[in-house]
Amino acid sequence: MNKEQIDIIGDNHISSNVDTPMRANAFEKSNDEKIKNIQHYFGKIMEELGLDLTDDSLSGTPYRVAKMYVKELFYGLNPENKPKLSVFENKYDYKKMLVEQNITIDSACEHHFLPITGHAHIAYIPKDKVVGLSKINRLVDYYSHRPQVQERLSLQILKDLQVTLNTEDVIVMINAKHLCVSSRGIKDKSSFTTTLEYGGCFKEKSFRDDFFKIINQKMI
Ligand SMILES: Nc1nc2c(ncn2[C@@H]2O[C@H](COP(=O)(O)OP(=O)(O)OP(=O)(O)O)[C@@H](O)[C@H]2O)c(=O)[nH]1
Ligand SMILES: [Zn+2]
């Protein structure tokens, strides 16, 4: 795949400060080549830690980890895996807030490669287009499956939905726990992180307040 093709199927041409920093030749190698190389290097890390790779429980770990990185945890680094977001004409002329809340966040922190887990709450006010509900969840899942910082994750979801839905009126809130804060370093088990990004009418407090009221309501 050349650079131009990557741009076309990339992150909807969102501005570069929101893009995940990628090497120019990031897509030259196939998944199989990447898995083979990561398997080699991860085996070296294990050896360096003093582990015996001839042990039958450890011998498959370098391959398992490599496959997990490329195909599972970080599948969202490859724009070819971006979900197709089916949008429909807003025939019913629904012009109020639509909230998709409690969307699972399964991500990884780019500083320590440890899990970030939590929930995203997203709302938008449709103009001419509406999107299939599950596509919002799929988009969150896609951008989460990259090494991330929570701020960039929130912005990537926001910008993408604004382009897809042809409206600035989108709000994205994420509450998440970072294992790099809870299980190492400061080891704070109780803190969690909230990020909030929004545009359009959500710049007005009354719209944000409505959103907060809805996401705080008792779950069905
Ligand atoms: N802003 C932001 N910081 C994050 C996120 N995930 C992890 N971090 C932080 O990234 C920082 C990296 O700081 P460094 O001082 O380079 O790394 P460190 O020595 O491992 O830091 P400690 O966690 O304080 O031990 C840490 O403070 C992490 O808590 C995130 O999503 N957003
Ligand atoms: Zn971290």
Image (tube, rainbow, N blue to C red):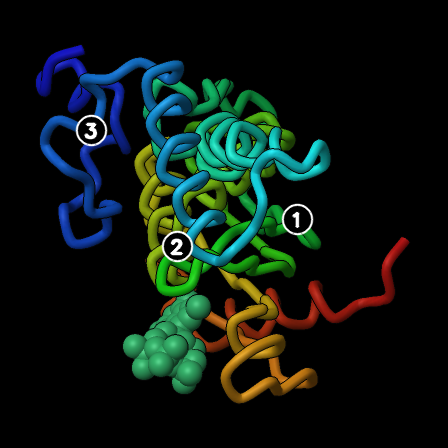
Residue 162 in picture, x, y percent from top left: 35, 42
Q: Residue at x 23, y 45 (%)?
A: 19
Q: Quadrant of residue 191?
A: bottom right
Disc 1 or 2, which lies upstream in sequence? 1
Residue 49 in picture, x, y percent from top left: 48, 58
Q: Quadrant of ligand 1?
A: bottom left
Q: Residue at x 55, y 78 (%)?
A: 184
User: Looking at the image, which is closer to me, 175 or 67?
Assistant: 67
Residue on which the image places disc 1 = 103
> Which residue, as the protein is rendered here, is positioned at the far right?
220
| Mark seen at residue 26 | 3
User: Gap in Å between the C-alphas at discs 3 and 1?
Assistant: 29 Å
| Mark seen at residue 148 | 2
Task: Point out the frontmost of discs 1 and 2.
Answer: 2
Q: Please tell me whether mark 3 sits on a helix, a strand or a loop.
A: loop
Residue 14 in picture, x, y percent from top left: 21, 40
Left or right, residue 83 beside residue 199: right
Work out whether 59 lies above or below 208: above
Q: Quadrant of residue 109?
A: bottom left
Disc 2 or 3, which lies upstream in sequence? 3
User: Gap in Å between the C-alphas at discs 2 and 3?
Assistant: 17 Å
Task: Point out the frontmost of discs 2 and 3.
Answer: 3
Label 2 Cα neighbours within 10 Å, binned few <14 / some 14-19 / many ≥20: many
Work out whether 101 lies above or below 89: below
At label 2, which amino acid type do we have?
Answer: Gln
At label 1, which amino acid type do we have?
Answer: Ile
The response on whether ligand 1 sits within 8 Å of label 2 is yes
Q: Please tell me whether mark 2 sits on a helix, a strand or a loop.
A: strand
Task: Point out the frontmost of discs 3 and 1.
Answer: 3
User: Looking at the image, which is closer to me, 108 or 161?
Assistant: 108
Asked if one can make out residue 143 in the rendered structure from this viewpoint, the answer is yes
